[in-house]
Image (cartoon, grey):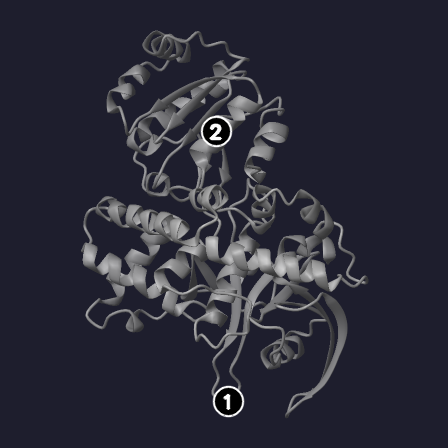
């Protein structure tokens, strides 16, 4: 399977003459271990893999501060000759031996030709609450997300279809047959999701029930991790808030909607832990007056999206499909899948950040689903579950912020149109609107 992160490892990180030890960050089961192993295979490197969760005693191999001594220890233990330029040292489940991260500085400074990758589940807890000295400036990070839609296409052996959408010209009409096929595959992506085990199971069996069984197993794995979430929180509360996230997609997250018996401070802490574990993500409210967007974040107001649309469908027990259905959750799930795909637009070495805008004045309510920075401008993105829908909020935002270009992601053909409307008590507003179907989200920057 093709992964963008693997491409980056092979063609950027590994070839960098000033390469640093690399830490893979991301939720459990997004493919971190597979990417490290596949990288070693692709580069014909001898893989020296240590798993600290499976064997905690391996920590003792790193007691020295001399990297040469450490490598001798590892070689003796594994029975593997470690050659600096033809081996890969892979430290898996590093969260169970976090003090080893501080040792990586010595490898960077004294053995820079040895490629080193570390990965682990719930690693964010360690990195945000570490009590040891992190080797700042001597390690690099990349962020692993579930499969993007384009990675999903390649997994299905649809390379020619991917090549087509990577070269779509907004001024040329997409043939209806191709549009229908891409919609159908996108529906499949929404059903299967982007978790590697689910994608693999679909390719293997072509059976939704088998995929759902894998999704249930993944959700059970996340729930099993709850006892690791600092150990001070009621597991029942963790589960209650986890179940509430699918029902608040596309809305400002309100603790009061979760469970009146859960106090806001406890709920806030649980959401923070979920965000650190990467099983859900903050979409931050911003005033959107200036760049960068995080300069005007309102910390008390936010949305949440889940790690993966397939897992969301499993939690809700119904699929989200592009069929103009009347499910009340469709708007929120459309925002979920777009947010998930927007995160994959970020380069793998940059932690993704998502933003939205909202005005709650009575009678003047308006909301923009997503905002991104592009070309030195703030670009609003409106998400529509179907091929139609009003753009009232977008009109007000464009007038209020004096913007001239906007994006709509919907279940329709791509187009670019000039919008001219008169707003009640607001006057005229005029702007260009780029509309693209869901399956072109990953091409957004190129089309802009």
Tell me the number on the disc at residue 363.
Answer: 1
- Of 201 and 401, the residue lying toward us: 201
Identify the secondary structure beneath mark 2: helix
- Residue occupying the far right of the picture: 171
The image quadrant where one finds the C terminus is: bottom right
Q: Is residue 77 left or right of residue 443?
A: left
Q: Position of residue 340 (x, y in %)?
A: 51, 55
Q: Is residue 219 left or right of residue 447?
A: left
Q: Position of residue 143 (x, y in %)?
A: 49, 41
The image quadrant where one finds the N terminus is: top right
- Of 286 and 343, the residue lying toward us: 343
What residue appears at the point 36 percent right and 63 percent down from the top-left corner? 317
Q: CA distance from mark 1 to mark 2?
A: 53 Å
Above/below status of 252 relative to 223: below
Question: Callout 2: 10 Å neighbours few (<14), some, many (20+)?
Answer: many
Q: Position of residue 117 (x, y in %)?
A: 46, 27
Q: Which residue is mark 2?
A: 36
- Of 199 and 147, the residue lying toward us: 199
Question: Callout 1: 10 Å neighbours few (<14), some, many (20+)?
Answer: few
């Amino acid at each position: 399977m093709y992964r963008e992160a693997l491409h980056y490892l092979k063609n950027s990180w590994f070839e960098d003459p000033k390469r640093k030890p690399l830490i893979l960050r991301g939720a459990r089961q997004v493919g971190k271990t597979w990417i490290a192993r596949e990288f070693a295979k692709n580069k014909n490197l001898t893989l020296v893999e240590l798993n600290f969760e499976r064997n905690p005693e391996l920590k003792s191999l790193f007691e020295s501060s001399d990297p040469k001594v450490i490598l001798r220890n590892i070689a003796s233990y594994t029975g593997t000759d470690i050659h600096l330029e033809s081996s890969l040292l892979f430290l898996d489940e590093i969260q169970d031996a976090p003090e080893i991260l501080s040792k990586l500085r010595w490898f960077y400074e004294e053995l820079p030709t040895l490629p080193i990758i570390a990965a682990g589940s719930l690693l964010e807890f360690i990195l945000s609450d570490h009590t040891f000295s992190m080797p700042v400036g001597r390690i690099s990070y990349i962020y692993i997300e579930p499969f993007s839609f384009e990675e999903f296409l390649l997994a299905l052996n649809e390379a020619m279809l991917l090549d087509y959408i990577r070269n779509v010209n907004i001024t040329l009409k997409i043939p209806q047959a191709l549009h229908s096929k891409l919609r159908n595959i996108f529906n499949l992506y929404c059903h299967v999701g982007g978790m590697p085990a689910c994608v693999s199971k679909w390719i293997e069996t072509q059976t939704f029930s088998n995929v759902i069984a894998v999704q249930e197993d993944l959700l059970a794995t996340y729930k099993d991790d709850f006892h690791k979430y600092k150990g001070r929180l009621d597991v029942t509360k963790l589960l209650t808030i986890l179940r509430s996230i699918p029902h608040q997609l596309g809305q400002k997250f309100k603790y009061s909607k979760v469970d009146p018996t859960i106090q806001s401070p406890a709920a806030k802490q649980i959401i923070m832990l979920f965000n650190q574990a990467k099983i859900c993500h903050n979409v931050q409210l911003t005033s959107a007056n200036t760049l960068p967007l995080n300069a005007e974040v309102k910390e008390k107001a936010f949305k949440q999206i889940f790690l993966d649309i397939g897992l969301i469908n499993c939690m809700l027990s119904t699929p989200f499909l592009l069929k103009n259905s009347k499910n009340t959750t469709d708007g929120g799930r459309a925002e979920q899948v777009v947010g998930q795909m927007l995160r994959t637009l970020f380069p793998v070495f940059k932690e993704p950040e998502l933003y939205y805008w909202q005005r709650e004045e009575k009678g003047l309510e308006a909301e923009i689903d997503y905002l991104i920075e592009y070309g030195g401008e703030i670009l609003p993105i409106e998400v529509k579950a179907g091929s139609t829908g009003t753009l009232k909020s977008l009109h007000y935002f464009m007038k209020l912020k004096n913007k001239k270009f906007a994006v709509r992601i919907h279940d329709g053909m791509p187009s670019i149109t000039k919008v001219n409307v008169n707003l009640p008590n607001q006057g005229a507003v005029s702007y260009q609107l780029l509309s693209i179907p869901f399956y072109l989200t990953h091409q957004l920057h190129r089309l802009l």
